[in-house]
Image: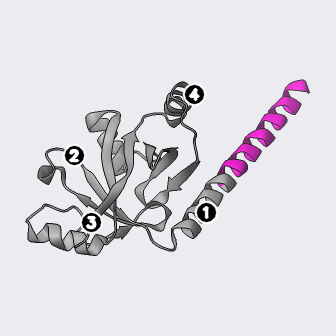
Amino acid sequence: MPKIKRINHIAIVVEDIDTALNFWSKTLGLELSHLEEVEDQKSLVAFLPTGESEVELVTPTSDDSGIARFLSKRGPGIHHICFEVDDIEAILEQLAEQDVRLINETPIIGTGGKKIAFIHPESTHGVLIELYELTPQEPEIRLRRTRALANRVLAEGYSKATAARSFLRDFRN
């Protein structure tokens, strides 16, 4: 019989990731392990491990994302609770047999390459639940996404520095 292994993370939607990180890192002392842009979900996620779980701070990168709609409708706050499972397909089948309303009837690939699926809040007394199963590809995909974000940040920083130098040269002349 498939089972839930543990709470993997709690996702919190935030308006400004830097302000949120200031509280969660500096005030509460949680260390940021990494940032990851999830392009298909149009969001940026900050991962803050705590014990065997994580707090994930999520902010939209586009006004037309699901996270942006959530933020607009409900404001910042807890978005979902994620449970790690040992066999996501079997659990989804078991839930469907019990007439649980699923957002994803089959798993999709989420952050880092893990298999994920969501249970609709109508079936969980108002809480969005994510189920996730680790895949062997997760470390490779997470590294690739983290490198892509780092490269983008470096490129943006370089172009801003170049523009600032150009402005200062023009200003002196």
In this rendering, is residue 152 above or below 157?
below
Q: Main secondary structure of the magenta part?
A: helix
Who comes first in sequence, dot 3 or dot 4? Answer: 3
Badge 3 density bin: few <14, some 14–19, many ≥20, Cα 10 Å: few
Quadrant position of the C terminus in the picture: top right
Q: Is residue 38 left or right of residue 34?
A: left
165 w.r.t. 140: above or below: above
Residue designated by label 2: 127
Task: Give neighbour class at mark 1: few <14, some 14-19, many 20+ (Cα, 10 Å).
Answer: few
Q: Residue at position x 55%, y 31% from top?
A: 29
The residue wearing badge 3 is 3
Q: Residue at x 26, y 53 (%)?
A: 129
Q: Nearer the viewer, residue 58 or 160?
A: 58
Q: On the image, numbered disc 1 is attached to which residue?
A: 143
Disc number lying in front (3 or 4): 3
Task: Tell me where the magenta segment starts and ends, as one range.
Answer: 152-173
Which element type, helix, strand or loop, lies under badge 2? loop
Tag 1 near tag 3, CB within 8 Å: no
Q: Is residue 164 magenta?
A: yes
Which circle marks residue 26 in the picture? 4
